[in-house]
Amino acid sequence: MHQEPAIGPAEPATTLLAAYDYDLPPELIAQTPAAERDSARLLGLDRATGAIRHAIARDLPRLLRPGDLLVVNDTRVRPARLRCRAAGGGAVELLLIAERRARVWTCLGRPAKRLRPGAALSLPGGGAATVRERIDPVGYEVEFSGESDVHALLARYGELALPPYIKRPHGLEPGDRERYQTIFAAREGAVAAPTAGLHFTADLLASLERIGVRHVSLTLAVGPATFLPVRVEDVREHHLDAEWAEVPAQTLEALERTKVQGGRVIAVGTTTVRALESFAARRAAGAPATDALARGGAPEGFWADTFILPGFRFRIVDGLLTNFHLPRSTLLMLVSAFAGRAQVLDAYAVAVRERYRFYSYGDAMLIC
């Protein structure tokens, strides 16, 4: 499922991929998390004035207001990387994305020469799988044998798939298994962490609660779009895959109450923005709010398919806590839509100059 980019009137330059480029010294790409989750640095950006302030994550209670509502993504990263063997004995790596039907999964994989349709794969623990078809340059449909319990297989042999810019030549480090999950992680299904949530601790949440800042959750299963580069010059032509999202009824009620009472909705992460604004866009367009009707208090589920570019009209989100994103990425485009491309790139230049740490294990921005 795919939706056209959500873009209204904007400068023509904002549709060009080169407009989202910036220079980043490689040594600023964080390879390990901060010593403590809430000790990461925090660059505050005033969306209205462009003013910048410097703080750390545990300063959030003095940067937010009583009545603000934080919305977090409670997805849990699945140990989705599976190391297999081709029929000739060569190594194959699969990244399991989603189960399309019983025992049939959409996967990313490498090397391509060992993953041609019909290729047989040996799985750790003795199971087997077959490549059924190629979906795109790096995507495959893989069918696992009837004897293979894929979820149990991943639980026993699967590995977390850290982003490729975090170098682990000898495999995951002991701390990765804990620190690449947020404290909110509850619902397994993502292949990448919603990294803005990595900065929270139970003590920080308690401090926020004491000043009247509550938090609620939703779920967006972060998919492989996180890893895939934009390869077109006009960003409106980029295909951004939909991701499954669920919004509990209590979260919807809290959003409405916050708006009525004059509070701000602060999205923790770009994944949360995409879920909230896709939900709002569906309602505004008169489409059914959900693709799977909620029953018995179950969360409302839908495909979050909104591609947010400058010119987008935000209907729910008033503030954003987010990490620093890759050049030329759809995530940087989303942040630029929220705070203005030139203003965001100016803030990134300040972050580079001040030696902030970038990407998943790096520092954060608060944009309000």
Image: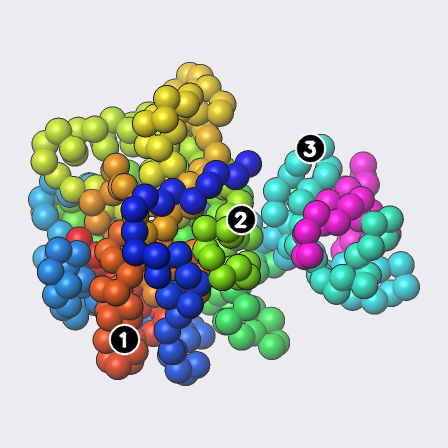
Q: Residues within 10 Å of mark 3 (few under 14, many from 20)?
A: few
Asked if the stretch drawn in magenta spans residue 143, the answer is yes
Determine whether 345 is above or below 159 in the image: below
Residue 235, quarter of picture? bottom left
In the image, taking residue 126 as reference, residue 337 lies left or right, namely left
C-alpha distance separating marks 3 and 1: 46 Å
Q: Is residue 127 visible?
A: no
Name the residue: 41% across, 53% down: 194
Residue 340, quarter of picture? bottom left
Asked if the stretch drawn in magenta spans residue 8, the answer is no
Read off the residue under disc 2.
239
Determine whether 203 is above or below 71 in the image: below
Name the residue: 16% across, 33% down: 259
Q: Position of residue 198 (x, y in %)?
A: 36, 58
Name the residue: 13% across, 55% down: 48
Q: Is residue 266 visible?
A: yes
Amino acid type indicated by mark 2: His
SS label for mark 1: helix
Number of the front mark, 3 or 1: 1
Read off the residue under disc 3.
101
C-alpha distance separating marks 2 and 3: 23 Å
Report the disc number at residue 261: none
C-alpha distance separating marks 1 and 2: 28 Å
Residue stretch in magenta = 120-148
For marks 1 and 2 on the same chain, the one whose residue lies earlier in the sequence = 2
Read off the residue under disc 1.
349
